[in-house]
Amino acid sequence: MKKFWLVILSFLLLSRGAFAENNDKLIKKINYLNEVVEIVGLPDFPPFSYYDTSGSHPKLSGAFINPILKLLKEREIQCKTSEISELRSMGVKLLLIDVKSGKYQMFIGANSDTKLYKGLELIYPSIISNPIHLITLPDNSSKFKNFDDLKNYKGIACREEYFSDFVLRKLKNMNVTFVDSSYEAYRLLFTGEADYMLGSLYYNRIAASKYGIEKYLSFSKRPIWKIPVFIALSKVMPKLSEYTKVFQELFSSPEFTLAVKQEIIRIIEDEIARNDGIVPPAFAKTPTEDEQPQEEVEQINNSVENKSKSGHIIEEEEVQQKTFDEVLEGL
């Protein structure tokens, strides 16, 4: 009889364990899987986020998109990228209103401590950064030995870029003028009306290649600032706290970080290759034999992980010892 009750007890314990496991899966499905997460991002800021118009319908593309879709599919979290044609023309301010109201749930490419993104739930830590570099013509690069040298020359920046409030505050104290397009910024550099440009290394590698002048520019080996780039959620989305927790876990994994970094390099290289052979504008001059083009992005060294859980900016004094390859590490 004693043996009989032991068998019964063992059966009950095993049944309870199986029930608990199935119940956990059910709870996870109820908590996470009954909402579709619709992803949007900066309308035109490659490689981080942009709307690809090469197909019949514009679709969201960028370094975060494929890694996010793959990761969420593995966790059976329903998500989709928006293919609404109006997104590209509506601009980031109107788009963010829709994110904050809950029409869209995830936004790619937010900056911390920036008024434009106030009201979004940032996913910490930021796993990649947007390095802001000094951009010059090769024969002007030797003028600048340190950050203070910039104050003695005329600089430009482009309104097409999505700078953080930190960068905008820094530029207010410098002799920097904003222009409306990267084309106008490059023209001022080549005509000598500006001595340098401050802009994103990644964005300007791509933008300059579209005008056939990427090889004619010199990018500083070290960044002036490294700005964390965040994935953000709408604060009014259902089960925000639960999604935030699971996304923090998923997006901070080494596999996700590596995948995003590899996508950045792929997008830059693909864009430069696609634009190879474009005839430069009339204002662009061919480099002389003594002028050296900027270093090429060859690979990402993943041996160093410099993550910031707080999302604070790494200022110029802290990055002066970084090599060019280490800049590509992100945060």
Image: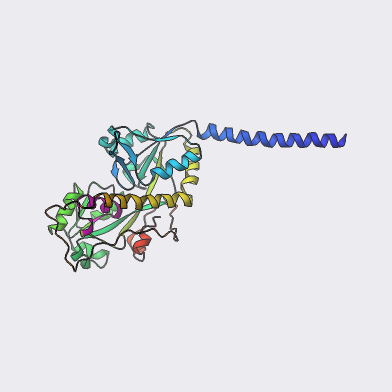
Q: Is residue 96 magenta?
A: no
Q: Is residue 28 left or right of residue 145?
A: right
The x and y percentages for residue 228 are: 37, 51
* Number of disc labels: 0
Q: Nearer the viewer, residue 79 or 288?
A: 288
Residue at horizontal 31%, vertical 62%? 222
The x and y percentages for residue 329 are: 39, 57
Residue at horizontal 32%, vertical 61%? 316
The x and y percentages for residue 183 are: 18, 49
Q: Which of 296 and 26 is in front in this view?
A: 296
Q: Which of 91 and 258 is in front in this view?
A: 258
Q: In this view, does 209 lie above or below 65?
A: below
Q: How was this image coloured?
A: rainbow
User: Hey, which quadrant is residue 155 in on the image?
Assistant: bottom left
Q: In this view, does 166 lie above or below 94?
A: below
Answer whether residue 205 is visible to the viewer in this image: yes
User: Hey, which quadrant is residue 67 in on the image?
Assistant: top left
User: Hey, which quadrant is residue 81 in on the image?
Assistant: top left
- Magenta stretch, main secondary structure, is helix
Q: In this view, does 323 lie above or below 234?
A: below
Q: In the current view of this chain or complex, which residue is farthest to the front?
A: 277
- Quadrant where the N terminus sits is top right
Magenta residues, start to end: 198-215
Answer whether residue 166 is visible to the viewer in this image: no
